[in-house]
Amino acid sequence: MKPTRPFHQTPVIAIDGPTASGKGTVAALVAAQLGFHLLDSGALYRLAALASVRYGVAADDDAALAALVGDLHITFREGCAQLDGVDVSSDIRAEEIGNRASAIAVHQSVRAALVARQRAFRKEPGLVADGRDMGTVIFPDAVLKVFLTASVEARAARRYKQLIQKGFSANMDNLLRDLRERDERDSNRAAAPLKPAADAKLLDTSALSIDQAVDEVVKWYRER
Ligand code: CDP
């Protein structure tokens, strides 16, 4: 019989970093190379943000938001995110939903309501988890913690390209302003602020291609 590991020994690679640092793409490719599951925790915050718009819950009403998040009916299937059984993969990528996700993510009650959903993604043979607090709060026992960074200009350029490719309109000056605002809010909030775990490896991707970043993370995992 195949030996099974206790749940807490299923390996997790945590990839955290600021907005548009490329962590989503890197995480997905690392997961594909290793045959691991993938958690895009930002998608959960985006789904919560979209639901708050649809159900008319204010972004500063933490009690109502936590109740909404606790009851969210969401599924991830073959790269599609569904809310109440409807594919919303494209809707949650809109920049205003990202900004609203960042606004509701400051509430400790909202974060707490998402913890169990995130930990449920930890399954054999392993998980790559992408977010802001994967290595610090959700999976503090991750076998590898990576903190991806890139200059604000490199990140704005990437986000611009991504939005245009997805058919959204985008303006570079507004993007730079929003990115700086989002960095500020994510880094300075009291609940799970964006910061590298003490044992995280830093990877600046400003001058790296996606493939180079992926190779580095896989190499660190194999060497650990
Ligand atoms: O795509 P981008 O990196 O801008 O954002 P995302 O990863 O999709 O997450 C959207 C927002 O959710 C972020 O700006 C964070 O404020 C919040 N978030 C968080 O607080 N904790 C996480 N683990 C993931 C996202």
Image: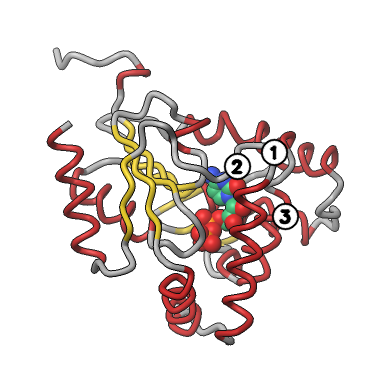
Q: Quadrant of the N terminus?
A: top left
Tag 1: amino acid = Ala
Q: Nearer the viewer, residue 57 or 157?
A: 157
Q: Is mark 3 within 8 Å of ligand 1?
A: yes
How far separated are the C-alphas under marks 3 and 1? Answer: 13 Å
Instruction: Pinpoint residue 91: horizontal percent, then vertical percent.
Output: 60, 69
Label 1: how many Cα within 10 Å (few below 14, some 14–19, many 20+): few
- Mark number, residue 193: 2
Image position, residue 113 (x, y; %): 67, 33
| Residue under pointer 1 | 190
The amino acid type found where label 2 is placed reads Pro
Q: Is residue 8 left or right of residue 181?
A: left
Asked if one can make out residue 170 in the rendered structure from this viewpoint, the answer is no
Q: Are marks 2 and 1 in contact (CB under 8 Å)?
A: yes
Residue 165 seen by the camera: yes
* Total count of labels: 3
Q: Residue at x 21, y 43 (%)?
A: 35
Instruction: Where is residue 150? Give x, y as percent.
Output: 39, 63
Q: Which mark is residue 136?
A: none
Disc 3 element: helix
**Who comes first in sequence, dot 2 or dot 3?**
3
Name the residue that disc number 3 marks: 103
Disc 1 Cβ-to-ligand 1 distance below 8 Å = no
